[in-house]
Image: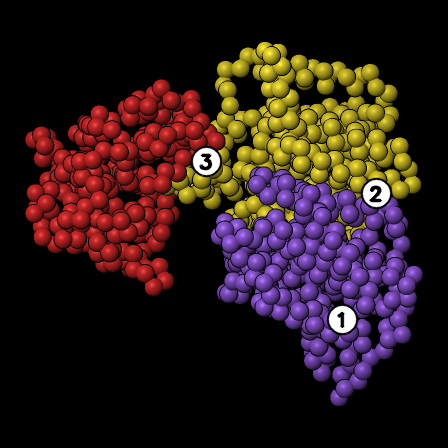
Chain colours: A yellow, B purple, C red
Amino acid sequence: MTTKNFPGYFRWLLLLLVLAIFPWFLKDQGYAIRVLILVMLFAAMAQSWNIVGGLANQISLGHAAFFGIGTYTSTILLIRFGISPWLGMLAAMLVAALAGAILSIPTMRLRGHYFALATLAFGEVMRAIANTWTSLTGGPVGISVPFSQPSLSLMQFKSSLPYYYIMLGALVITTVIFILISRSKLGYRLRAVKANPEAAEVIGVNTVRTKVMAAVISAALMGACGTLYAQFNFFFDPDTAFSLTGVSIRVALICIIGGIGTAAGPIIGAFFIIPVEELFNDLLSGQAAGVSQLGYGLILIAIILIEPHGISALLERGKKMWKGKRYV
Amino acid sequence: MQLLQALIDGLLIGGVYAVISIGLTLVFGVVGIINFAQSQFLMVGMFIAFFAWKFLGLDPLFGAVLAFAGVFVLGALIQKYLISRVLKAPEVSQIFLTVGLLIVLENLALIVFGSEFRSVQTAYQTSAWRLGGLMFNVPYVAAFAVSAVTGLLIWWVLKKTWWGWAVRATSQDVMAAQLVGISPARVHQMAFGLGVGLTALGGSIILPYLTVSPTIGDQFGVLMFTVVVLGGLGNILGAVVGGLAVGMIQSISSLVMPIQLQNLALFLIFILVLAVRPEGLLKKAS
Amino acid sequence: MSDVTKEKAGGVKLLEVSHVTRRFGGLTAVNDVSFSVNRGDIIGLIGPNGAGKTTLFNLLVGLTKPNQGQVVLDGVSIGGSKPSRIATAGMTKTFQNVALFAEMTVLDNVLVGGLLRHSVEDARALAEKNLARVGLAAIAGKKAGDLSFPERARVEMARALCTGPKLLLLDEVMAALNETEMDALLELIRSLRDNEGLTFIVVEHHMRAIMNLCNRIIVLCFGQKIAEGTPADIASDPAVIDAYLGSSIDTEVSA
């Protein structure tokens, strides 16, 4: 991780500028901008996942739990108590963070496949709770977010642009947090724990506290994204909010394919996966649901077989090959 | 009396859970990965048996053999061309390869077969035997019988045949196994094929009392993992005991809880066991 | 030893180990071992392979819990505590099989040690300083996984130093060093003791190093303490000669 990286910062700023200006060229409330909004949101979600998946190298397949908690917490607070979604988002982050801390306990000593399994089950538990606790969540029919008029305090708009900038903001914030953590004590400790937890303990790294911190931060950010989704989509149900394939696997995938552990990975991954999915959906209606999923299942398998470390690594390989050719 | 009935039903179903789960635990024990797509092979097995019934008039209990054979071959090929490529790769890749497989299989089935539910009609589907006030549901009993026979066959193969010995050797020490002339690649293929084949077999024998659809795998996924974690990942006897236990737990809890909460109880047990005793509740390694 | 060190060594009890036992199933790896360490001591821990030296170290830093017995560091009972707590209390060790963070650079590896008591920037400066002290400033940028064995042991020592320990347990850091490197390391250990008041327990098979460096030696055999004393005492102890030195594995031969 280089510290003095003027060209690096410049690249990020340029990207931000492009992303900020680009939507002005798109038709408002149109299809393209909707896809872009989802790209931003999922990139932010993948970046949250990246903190646990990339830095700590714990592959969670249950992050939908935190996302769903986010959607329900802020929406219930809005509908029942009229609380602004902005505040609701903070509450969502708190509850999600709590869930993250709770999940850390049974999964503390687990690694690899076992960890993936346990988190998967956790996500499913949350989904089951949401489906059964009808008095709180409305059960399987889901919740609709009431729309009255465009309002910043209620985080609801007719135009797509405000939503886009909110999602972009979320992406920027999660990415900045990821980078800051990477360079901080927590980042170094996470990498140490990932590499050799025993040695890390012996030189004073409290592995339990380190892992819990990562889990809590990741969960909280994911919860915030849940709120944003609810406000944008105006509707969600347990099977969507806590979806294994639609959320948990998808964000992990986005991060992995883009390059796990890198700050750019989730962004690259989201720009690749979401539009491709939408394209598939578009080209083939009727059995669309199956086909787009099938498509990305196949692409996933293909990418893993070609380059286990994701697109970033693939690009590295490509770069090296190209450099090699130059001198030949 | 109700309790006893629930116990019996649970035991009978548990036998099936056991057979389904042996496959998963076998794959982990020999190949070393958790096959997240395992429940999809159950679905494939069910479909094979269904179509065998529809077009060949084959009773699912016999269709099970076909399902086993077909999925065995499929499994061996998947191991050979896909899974073997990531055995030395980071765990992330291993996890997502089988997750990718899960997505592919389920959606392929959705596309090819559509999402409607189908079921078979057999002569004995709704009949039951009465014995001293207890009902023995015939399809359950038949499924249990097949499971038991299969279980014994597996035990015999693993303990008494050369191939079974090769499998056990490979799962314990790959290098040593190679030194005595065993080909780990071969063993992996056989083991994976056997593993998913068993799950497929389990799928077909439950066909008489369940409906088949491309999403049926989701119902059994976490259940299988619960069984296997309870009994210890890689522990075949554990899968058997775990299967029976889960069957009975499910059955008894259905007396007191609505279905969604039953699953909840199961999940929570699962996470608890993983947290406290990842090796499973049984001590012996197999 | 200088007068300064004689003073220091004479005094404050830093570590008290009482009747510590560790069993693994049927094997008793450490059997009723007791000893104490004063501030400024450099204790040598010797014994044949399998004598329980590494297990004893693991017990002291908390990687394993004693079945019986107490460990008290600077008046605080730490037996059974987590390693990170013990590191905070001031005791850490290096690993015999070397446990570096393979994908990180040498500098980053050492830096992590400093995070216990310093910010990232300060830890980095401290890491550079300690790396220079063990003579490895040149390889700071190399990936830890690419190092040669003697380099790795010294990186570990630098890392351990960064935690600011009172008591440092060194597990065979001198294996595979040549004469010059070993002398430099001995000098470093002595100066750390003299100038910073660090205390050491050192496991080594290099008899020359142990005899020259340590003011006291403890001999372990099959998990039991069979002798304790000055180098002169130990060299002439019949039990020790019988069990260990007589059939010694290596003495002056360098790797």
Give neighbour class at mark 3: few <14, some 14-19, many 20+ (Cα, 10 Å).
many
Looking at the image, tell me whether mark 3 or mark 2 is earlier in sequence order.
3
Amino acid type indicated by mark 3: Ala
Give neighbour class at mark 1: few <14, some 14-19, many 20+ (Cα, 10 Å).
many
Which residue is located at x 82 percent, y 37 percent? A292
- Tell me, yes or no, if residue A199 can be seen here: yes
Q: Nearer the viewer, residue C42 or C244?
A: C244
Whether labels 1 and 3 share one chain: no
Residue holding disc 3: A192
Pointer 1 with pointer 3, Cβ within 8 A:
no
Which residue is located at x 80 percent, y 16 percent? A24
- SS of the residue under disc 3: helix
Residue holding disc 2: A290
Res. A90 image quadrant: top right
Q: Position of residue B172 (x, y in %)?
A: 51, 55
Which residue is located at x 76 percent, y 83 percent? B134
Residue holding disc 1: B143
Q: How far, Cα to Cα, is label 2 from label 1? A: 32 Å
Q: Position of residue A58 (x, y in %)?
A: 57, 41
Res. A267 image quadrant: top right
Q: How many marks?
A: 3
What subunit carries mark 3?
A: A
Amino acid type indicated by mark 2: Gly
Whether labels 3 and 2 share one chain: yes
